[in-house]
Image (cartoon, rainbow, N blue to C red):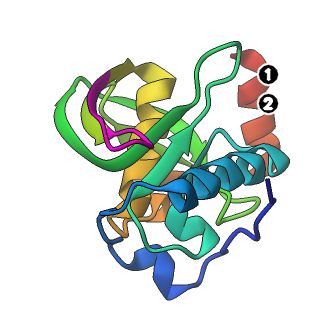
Amino acid sequence: MTVLKIVEHPNDILTTPAADVTEFNEELGKLLDDMYETMVAADGIGLAAPQIGVSKRIAIVDMGEGQEVIEMINPQVVAIGGKEVEVEGCLSFPGLYGEVERPYYVKVEAEDRDGNLYELEAEDYEARAIQHEIDHLNGILFTSKIIRYVSPEEFMEEGEEQ
């Protein structure tokens, strides 16, 4: 597996909607594995393919703590509920944090690395991470949703309280 370079803002690939994945093969599996290694090396919890320069609808989320890595190919949000405001950051915007309002609950339809369709339901922080990555696939950056910017120091203090 390979750690790839993360694309940082500004870069047009980050604001361009990604193309659907049509081929489910070894190349896709390798890309998913490389994305995971890249995300871990960057100390992230999610990564979308455009963030490594690949304009395809592929994203991963890893909440850690023994949970299974979520691999989403061609994901679509099919239901949302509630709302909450929390601080987010992004690997493509190092050192930038801000409060973003998102639905508390999300239901997603996606395909796995073998092309099998599945549904996923998530709440709270996991739902937030999933929505953040799906936004990347649609060319939407979290900076367009920031209500209030937060300093890195303030972000660290809030993280310690949780």
The boundaries of the magenta stretch are 111-120
**Residue 57 falls in image quadrant:** bottom left
In this rendering, the answer to whether 119 lies above or below 99 is above
The x, y position of residue 105, in whole percent, is: 30, 23
Depth order, front residue of 113/123: 113
Q: Quadrant of the C terminus?
A: top right
In this rendering, the answer to whether 118 lies above or below 24 is above
Residue on which the image places disc 2: 157
Instruction: Give me the residue at 79% from left, 53% from top.
Output: 1
The x, y position of residue 151, in whole percent, is: 73, 51
Question: Are circles 2 and 1 on residues that touch, CB within 8 Å?
Answer: yes
Q: Residue furthest front?
A: 26
Residue on which the image places disc 1: 160
Q: Is residue 112 magenta?
A: yes
Instruction: Give me the residue at 27% from left, 29% from top.
Output: 118
Q: Which amino acid does the dot numbered 1 rest on?
A: Glu
**Residue 140 falls in image quadrant:** bottom left
The x, y position of residue 110, in whole percent, is: 29, 40
Q: Residues within 10 Å of mark 2 (few under 14, many from 20)?
A: few
Instruction: Give me the residue at 30% from left, 36% from top.
Output: 116
The CA distance from mark 2 to mark 1 is 5 Å
